[in-house]
Image: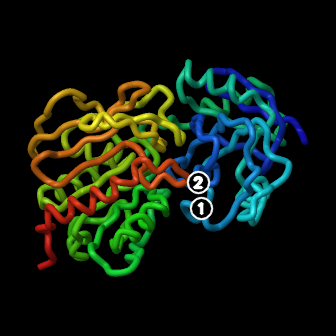
Amino acid sequence: MSKAFLVLDDGRIFEGLSWAFEGVTFGEAVFQTGMTGYQETLTDPSYHKQVVVMTAPHIGNTGMNKDDNESKKIWVSGFVVRNPSPVTSNWRSEKSLEDELIAQKIVGISGIDTRALTRHLRDRGAMRVGIFSGKNLTREEMVIEVRKQPQMSGSNLSEDVSTKQTYIVPAEGDKKFTVAAIDLGIKGATPRALAQRGVETHVMPYDCTFEQIRAINPDGVFLSNGPGDPATMTSVVDLVREILLSEIPIFGICFGHQILGQALGFETYKLQFGHRGINQPVIDRKTNKVEITAHNHGFALKAPTEGIFSTVFGTGEVTHVSLNDGVVEGLQLLERGAFSVQYHPEAAAGPHDASYLFDRFIELMQKYPARMRAS
């Protein structure tokens, strides 16, 4: 294997080995703390335009299979591991991780000190990065190339990952509800989780209109996860305000949580290095129960974590808070059916502490029958 270089926009360079597809790639450097679930990470549209650093040192031993994909392709811009597994040993594996990365032209690097890189990102914050393999550039030239790339702040990326046309995921067994899911970068596990609860999900483009949503006569609206800066999503925020006025129940996760928060009047801000991984502790403010949750976000909401807050849609409260840094992880309106969480209740590949939130959405649709009906 030939040499490869991981170059950060603050000038720090890590030397490693070319791995997966050889070439050059750029993105935002982020670290993911899960010890398992790399396939779900790779195929999660929320990681679009990001170079993912796996903090677990040994990656790839379970291979890849078609059943665990969260979308139709790998979305990460680049993949960074310390020790890629030389063999695949799992009964469900259909292809090696490296072979799949090569097939989809995902540039990778191995053999670097991912612990040192993670500590650097924790201290300095997520930043632009490039992986260079098979290119004869000086260190100065590589840094210049990285600094030419766009920042994640101000990036509108939902158009890249959203479905172009509405598609339907049918309910399993008897159909109980119809949900319009606004695809900001939705994972496949979400409509599957709803289907298991008797929900027919219409996955709709990010730029769908209120009239298009009304036409399917939904019992609820789901706001999905997704990549980019939530502050750029003004048209979707306006759409959510229309939905709130119609009093149809809303459930948002991750990016959708930030969209709902903005619709209620709150601002978002960029976290220093974000929350990514399947081991993030969150406390439920009402029950004091601690959930271990799956996260992937680099932005958060500015909302009061104590007491009741007022909005044009009634009063609300923050329901969940991160135990690591106090970030707002959930909120709800108290006078109509709308709530959201910053994390992933579908949580493929785990944990499943928060799967009850889908049941809460079902209860919300039962409690607040949708008043928005097609004329």
Where does the image place residue 11, in percent across and percent down from the top left?
Answer: 67, 21
Three-letter amino acid code of the residue under disc 2: Glu
Cα gap from disc 1 to disc 2, whole angstroms:
6 Å
Q: Say which residue appears at 14% left-offset and 62% top-offset.
A: 368
The reply, left or right, for residue 9 in relation to residue 361 is right
Front-most of residues 249 and 226: 249
Quick one: SS at disc 2? Answer: helix
Three-letter amino acid code of the residue under disc 1: Asn
Front-most of residues 133 and 267: 267
Q: Is residue 265 above or below residue 190?
A: above
Q: Say which residue appears at 42% left-offset and 66% top-offset.
A: 191
Image quadrant assignment for residue 115: top right
Q: Say which residue appears at 13% left-offset and 59% top-offset.
A: 247
Residue that label 2 marks? 40
The reply, left or right, for residue 159 in relation to residue 58 is left
The reply, left or right, for residue 254 in relation to residue 10 is left
The numbered dot on residue 86 is none
Question: Mark 2 or mark 1, which is nearer the start of the sequence?
Answer: 2
Where does the image place residue 233, in percent across and percent down from the top left?
Answer: 33, 48
| Label 2 packing within 10 angstroms: few (<14), some (14-19), many (20+) | many
Task: Quarter of the image for the C terminus: give it.
Answer: bottom left
Front-most of residues 20 and 87: 87
Q: Residue furthest right?
A: 1
The reply, left or right, for residue 151 in relation to residue 216 is right
Image quadrant assignment for residue 67: bottom right
Q: Is residue 301 above or below residue 338?
A: above
Residue that label 1 marks? 69
Task: Quarter of the image for the N terminus: give it.
Answer: top right
**Circle 1/circle 2 CB separation < 8 Å:** yes
| Label 1 packing within 10 angstroms: few (<14), some (14-19), many (20+) | many
Where does the image place residue 291, in percent across and percent down from the top left?
Answer: 41, 40
